[in-house]
């Protein structure tokens, strides 16, 4: 078993460069998102439009195939309409998406606060306060995005860009570490 594991490890170490390429691409995406946040927002809206449209088409086809013209069919038509609206009026689609994020953050925060209060006997004081603070932050973020949607869009793009850069750095570091291990295993010992 150890020989098999060593062979598998050496084989996987041969592909260290894949992690490096993924890391560089992730860092590049993050930097582009920071440099041109408008393009990032447009790309997100385009992805949403494509998803809504294709989801709608597949729902319609499934409903027709199974001869079930109920909620699946109606949902499919709605998906196609939303996808087309997102392409024709991208600003409206962007606004709707940001309001959805705001509503999610606000609602999630309320539920976190309620859970902390309800479970205060079980969780303990430290966990309860951490959950309450995370709920308050989530509610505040939701309200911030709802009242200043344009700033909210750019804040979300900034978070996506920051995550992408962080991910890229960690992938790059992992790839370089894997290369070092690959070179150590490839070098014959004297």
Image: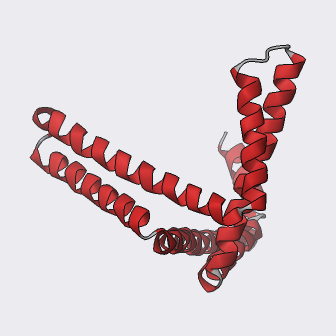
Is residue 55 positioned above or below 60 on the image? Answer: below
Residue 131: % across, % down:
24, 49
Q: Is residue 141 visible?
A: yes
| In-image side of 137 versus 103 (left or right) | left
The residue depicted at 73 percent of the width and 18 percent of the height is 70
Residue 87: % across, % down:
78, 59
Give the number of callouts.
0
Q: Foreground: 149 or 8?
A: 149
Which of the 4 image quarters holds residue 143?
Answer: bottom left
Which of the 4 image quarters holds residue 161?
Answer: bottom right
Is residue 8 positioned above or below 72 on the image? Answer: below
Q: Is residue 179 visible?
A: no
Q: Foreground: 173 or 83?
A: 83
Is residue 18 positioned above or below 122 on the image? Answer: below
The residue depicted at 47 percent of the width and 69 percent of the height is 152
The extreme top residue here reads 67
Residue 20: % across, % down:
70, 73
| In-image side of 164 versus 53 (left or right) | left
- State the quadrant of the N terminus: top right
| Color encoding of the figure | secondary structure
- State the quadrant of the C terminus: bottom right
| In-image side of 85 versus 27 (left or right) | right
Residue 98: % across, % down:
53, 60
The residue depicted at 39 percent of the width and 66 percent of the height is 147
Is residue 59 positioned above or below 173 on the image? Answer: above
The extreme bottom residue here reads 35
């Amino acid at each position: 078993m150890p020989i098999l594991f060593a062979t598998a490890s050496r084989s996987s170490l041969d592909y260290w460069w894949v992690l490096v390429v993924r890391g560089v691409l992730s860092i590049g995406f993050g930097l582009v998102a920071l440099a041109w946040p408008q393009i990032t927002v447009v790309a997100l809206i385009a992805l949403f439009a494509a998803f809504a449209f294709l989801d709608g088409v597949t729902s319609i086809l499934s409903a027709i195939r199974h001869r079930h013209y109920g909620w699946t069919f109606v949902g499919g038509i709605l998906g196609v309409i939303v996808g087309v609206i997102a392409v024709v009026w991208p600003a409206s689609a962007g606004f709707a998406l940001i309001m959805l994020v705001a509503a999610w953050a606000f609602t999630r925060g309320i539920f976190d606060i309620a859970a902390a209060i309800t479970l205060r006997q079980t969780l303990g004081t430290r966990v309860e306060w951490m959950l309450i603070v995370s709920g308050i932050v989530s509610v505040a973020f939701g309200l911030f995005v709802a009242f200043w949607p344009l700033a909210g869009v750019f804040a979300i793009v900034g978070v996506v860009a920051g995550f992408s850069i962080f991910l890229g750095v960690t992938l790059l570091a992992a790839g370089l570490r894997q290369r070092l291990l690959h070179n150590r295993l490839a070098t014959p010992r004297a």
